[in-house]
Image (cartoon, rainbow, N blue to C red):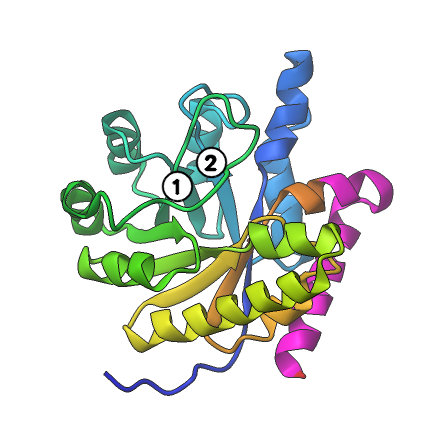
C-alpha cells in the first residue's frame, strides 16, 4: 500500500482526568471536569480525552454520562480492555475508544498495550465496538511488531507512546532522546503506510511537543497532565492556547 504523506490541521485532544483527580482529593463537586472540557473547546481543543479507570481514581461514570450529554467535541474514552469497560463504551458509544494497559498500582499509564501478545483476544474485543460506530485506537509503544498487530486486528488508529522520549528529555539524555524521537518518526510513517491513522501522546510539554507535532503522519496529540498543571500558574485557557500555538507553528514550519 502506497500512501501520500498527510498534511493539514494537527488535532489537539485535551485530557481532563486530573481535573477530576483534584476534585476527588477533597470529595467535593468541584472543580468540574465538564466545565474544563468546555473551556478546552473554547481554547482550541479538537477533542476531549477521559480515562475511566477500574478504580475510578479520577474520572467517574457520572463524568462520562455528563460529557456525552454536554460536549459538542468528540469524546475519546480511554479504557482497559475489560468486559466492564466494553459494556460502558457500548452503552455510551463515544466517538473514539482508546485501549490502554492498566494496573491498579500504577500512578499513570506506564507503557503501551502488548497487542502482539494478545492479538486474538483484542481482535474479538474491538469487533463490537467497531460495529457500534466507535473509532478504535490502540495505545502502543513505537515498535513495528505492535503497529503491525494493531493493523491486523482492525484498529482504525494507533496512539504512539511518547513517554520514553519525554523522560529522556527531562533527564538530559540528549543522544538517547534524539534516537527515541527518530524511532517515533519512523514508526509514525510505518503506521501510516499500513493505513492506520497515527496519534501520539503521554508526557508532552511545551519543551517536547514541537518535534512530535512536526511529523506529518501524526494527526492528533493527546495531552493532559502537563496542561492541567500549567493551568495552576496561567489558567486553563492560556495554557491550552500556548500548546495549540506551538503545535501549529511546528506543523506549519
Numbered disc in front, either 2 or 1: 1
Q: Main secondary structure of the magenta part?
A: helix
Quadrant containing the C terminus is bottom right
Q: Is residue 234 magenta?
A: yes
As measured in the structure, the alpha-carbon distance from the residue carrying label 2 to the one carrying label 1 is: 9 Å
| Residue nearer the viewer, 67 or 153 | 153
User: Which picture quadrant has residue 241?
Assistant: bottom right
Q: Which mark is residue 51?
A: 2
Boundaries of the magenta span: 229-252
Q: From the viewer's perspective, tell me whether residue 37 is left or right of residue 97.
A: right
Q: Is residue 42 above or below residue 231?
A: below
Residue 189 visible from this viewpoint: yes
Asked if residue 108 is positioned above or below residue 134 in the image, the reply reads above
Mark 2–mark 1 CB contact (< 8 Å): yes
Image point 67% across, 75% down: which residue? 250
Q: Quadrant of residue 52?
A: top left
Return the x and y of residue 153 as percentages of the image width and height: 19, 55
Return the residue at label 1.
100
Q: Is disc 2 placed on a helix, strand or loop?
A: strand
Q: State the image coordinates of residue 53 (x, y, percent, origin top left).
A: 44, 27
Q: Does residue 155 show up?
A: no
Residue at the spot 49% in from the left edge and 28% down from the top edge: 63
Which image quadrant: the N terminus? Answer: bottom left
**Residue 173 percent location from the top left of the image:** 71, 57
Amino acid at each position: 500500500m502506497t500512501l501520500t504523506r498527510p498534511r493539514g490541521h494537527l488535532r489537539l485532544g485535551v485530557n481532563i482526568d486530573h481535573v477530576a483527580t483534584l476534585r476527588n482529593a477533597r470529595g467535593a463537586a468541584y472543580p468540574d471536569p465538564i466545565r474544563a472540557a468546555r473551556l478546552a473547546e473554547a481554547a482550541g481543543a479538537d477533542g476531549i480525552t477521559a480515562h475511566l479507570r477500574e478504580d475510578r481514581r479520577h474520572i467517574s461514570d457520572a463524568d462520562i454520562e455528563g460529557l456525552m450529554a454536554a460536549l459538542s467535541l468528540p469524546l475519546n474514552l480511554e479504557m482497559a480492555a475489560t468486559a466492564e469497560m466494553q459494556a460502558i463504551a457500548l452503552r455510551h458509544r463515544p466517538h473514539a475508544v482508546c485501549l490502554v494497559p492498566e494496573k491498579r498500582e500504577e500512578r499513570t499509564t506506564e507503557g503501551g498495550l502488548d497487542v502482539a501478545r494478545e492479538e486474538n483476544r483484542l481482535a474479538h474485543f474491538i469487533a463490537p465496538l467497531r460495529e457500534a460506530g466507535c473509532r478504535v485506537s490502540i495505545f502502543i509503544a513505537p515498535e513495528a511488531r505492535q503497529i503491525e498487530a494493531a493493523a491486523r486486528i482492525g484498529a482504525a488508529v494507533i496512539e504512539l507512546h511518547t513517554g520514553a522520549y519525554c523522560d529522556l528529555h527531562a533527564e538530559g539524555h540528549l543522544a538517547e532522546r534524539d534516537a527515541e524521537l527518530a524511532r517515533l518518526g519512523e514508526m509514525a510513517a510505518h503506521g501510516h503506510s499500513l493505513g492506520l491513522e497515527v496519534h501520539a501522546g503521554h508526557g508532552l510539554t511545551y519543551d517536547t511537543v514541537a518535534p512530535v507535532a512536526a511529523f506529518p503522519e501524526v494527526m492528533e496529540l493527546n495531552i493532559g497532565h502537563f496542561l492541567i498543571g500549567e493551568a495552576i500558574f496561567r489558567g486553563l485557557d492560556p495554557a491550552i492556547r500556548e500548546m495549540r500555538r506551538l503545535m501549529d507553528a511546528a506543523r506549519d514550519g
